[in-house]
Amino acid sequence: MLPIGDDNSQRRLFPIVTYALIALNVFVFLLELAGENAFINSWSFVPARMISNPTAGFITLFTSMFLHAGWLHLGGNMLYLLIFGDNVEDRFGHFKFLVFYILCGLAAGLAQYAVSMSSENPTLGASGAIAGVLAAYLVLFPGRKVRVLLAAWIVNLPALLVIGVWIVIQLVSGLGTLSNATTSGGVAYMAHIGGFAAGLVLTLFLRGKAREITF
């Protein structure tokens, strides 16, 4: 069930921050391709380094949000940011949305760190911050229709269902990886869960009085 679009008819603001974040992620990925593993090792978040050098560790919590493991990783994350980020930015405003995005990304990294403090595996990707964006979209636009590619068909489903299924998968998968989070690589599910939780909390403070509920 792959989201491919949503209804932007009520959007008022040009989503300059969303587009800028996408451009920045693409630019940094091109730097990755040039710098190869040395670049990734320098700027991704490695939990074990946080203990020996907290300052450098915290800096890489931020920089790792703009790194990706490959074209598919980058493309998937940017697709979600493009679909869901513009409407959240429209509701929050440009500056609040940027702060929201960064805070969700940091919370995601800290959540992953909490379950893998001694891991030497690099953690990277925008998905923790984007998980926060999904949480905000779920709160603000639960009934808005999202176009998804479902097998061979394109169907319109409410955001509550699309994002709800996504977070359930993250929760189940995250619980399943807790036993080996320290030693194994792969998807950082706890980062997704942490970013989503941060997004829910922050949205309660940042959202306006109006709340769209349309099914």
Image (cartoon, rainbow, N blue to C red):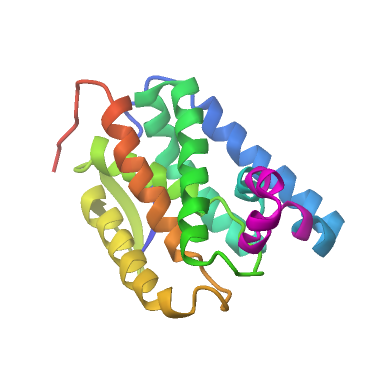
> Residue 111: horizontal and vertical position, in percent?
45, 55
Give the residue drawn at x 51%, y 29%: 98
Q: What stretch is highlighted in magenta?
A: 41-60
Q: Where is residue 40 in the image (x, y as percent from the top left)?
A: 75, 58
Quarter of the rendering occupied by the N terminus: bottom left
Q: At 15% from the left edge and 38% from the top edge, which residue is drawn?
A: 214
Query: Is 171 a magenta residue?
Result: no
Q: Hey, which quadrant is residue 85 in on the image?
A: top left
- In the rendered structure, the answer to whether residue 124 lies left or right of residue 215 reads right
Q: Is residue 48 above or below residue 62?
A: below
Residue 20 percent coordinates (x, y): 61, 32
Q: What secondary structure predominates along the stretch shown in magenta?
A: helix
User: Left or right: 155 with respect to 127?
Assistant: left
Q: Residue at x 20, y 20 (%)?
A: 209
Residue 10 can be seen, yes or no: no
Q: Can residue 26 be seen in this view?
A: yes
